[in-house]
Image (spheres, grey):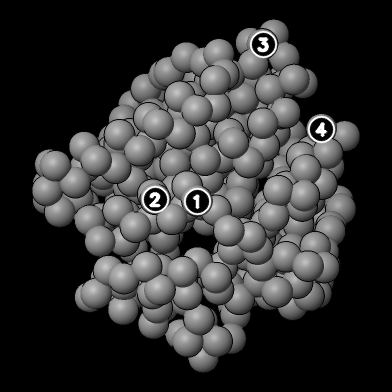
Amino acid sequence: MKSLYKTPESKAAILAIYQDKLDELQIEHQFQMVDTTFGPTHIIITGDPQNPPLVLIHGSNGCAPIALEVYPNLAEQYCVYAVDVIAQPNRSAETRPSMKDGSYGKWMNEILAGLNLEDVTLVGFSFGGFVIWKTLLEDGSRVKEAFLAAPVGIVNGNPLKLMLNVFMPMKRYMKSPKLKHLQKFLGGLFSERDDFAVRFLSKVITNFEMDFTPIPTIKIKEAQRISTPMTIIAAKYDLIAPGEKLLKRAKKIFPSLKEHLLLEDSKHVQSAVDNRRIEALILRG
């Protein structure tokens, strides 16, 4: 199988940055690999194993340590399983499941079974939210509740705004890796400057084969099949999943929508202040 990394050296460089972030967190943790149909999946486990289980799913072009940094207090009440999403720049297999069918849902359910988890709380940001609704469609029997922050695949953003503010700057950076192009790209997505994102994504964009497959939008009949209680957090100035549009559709199509929150000042990637609000919502249960 062809690697998603340009070279072995670029893979080593990206994983070194991954390790730097994990070390920086200074948390007690252990690792576990779970074999799935799509290849081995790497998981970072932190918190008291006697606590209820929570599975944390990061967004596109991310990794588990980033998700752990965003929600650092979840391990006080949960045993947190931070998953390295498959085919992303992290320690899981490079096999890329199809987004058009139930593959991502099957993959996650195989992880839950492999970890022998029941009554799980799922928490996912962006693409992690997509993985969650795919999981609930495939089989939600192991899931107690789900929290989706700025989830993709429920509504689409304005394609022109996305092109001008996200994709064109990213393509420019791929061709000519100048900081101004990267900052323009990040500025379209991030609510505040993130130095780690600059360091990590500068390597990922130029050295990793990102997936540009259009993300399918959940159908009404599919959404109505989901019975697991869900909380959706939306960001008002999100170019990928515009917050007001997202919540308007979510209220219409998800019968199990338990709660919702609109972050009035947020872009797609939330600020530290808004992440604490999301975290408090999860900890409240």
Which secondary structure lies at badge 4? helix
Q: Where residue 59 is drawn, which disc sits there?
A: none
The kind of residue tagged 1 is: Asp
State how far apart marks 4 and 1 are (Cα).
27 Å
Mark sitting earlier along the chain (3/4): 3
State how far apart marks 4 and 2 are (Cα).
30 Å
Q: Position of residue 209 (x, y in %)?
A: 25, 59
Q: Label 4 belongs to which residue?
A: 283
Q: Where residue 48 is drawn, which disc sits there?
A: 3
Badge nearest the viewer, 1 or 3? 1
Query: Residue placed at 43% from the left, 55% from the top?
Result: 198
Mark sitting earlier along the chain (4/1): 1
Q: Nearer the viewer, residue 94 or 255?
A: 94
Q: Label 1 belongs to which residue?
A: 195
Q: Label 2 belongs to which residue?
A: 199
| Contact check, label 1 and label 2, Cβ < 8 Å | yes
Q: Is residue 283 left or right of residue 165?
A: right
Query: Residue placed at 77% from the left, 43% from the top?
Result: 276
Query: Residue placed at 44% from the left, 41% from the top?
Result: 63
| Contact check, label 3 and label 4, Cβ < 8 Å | no
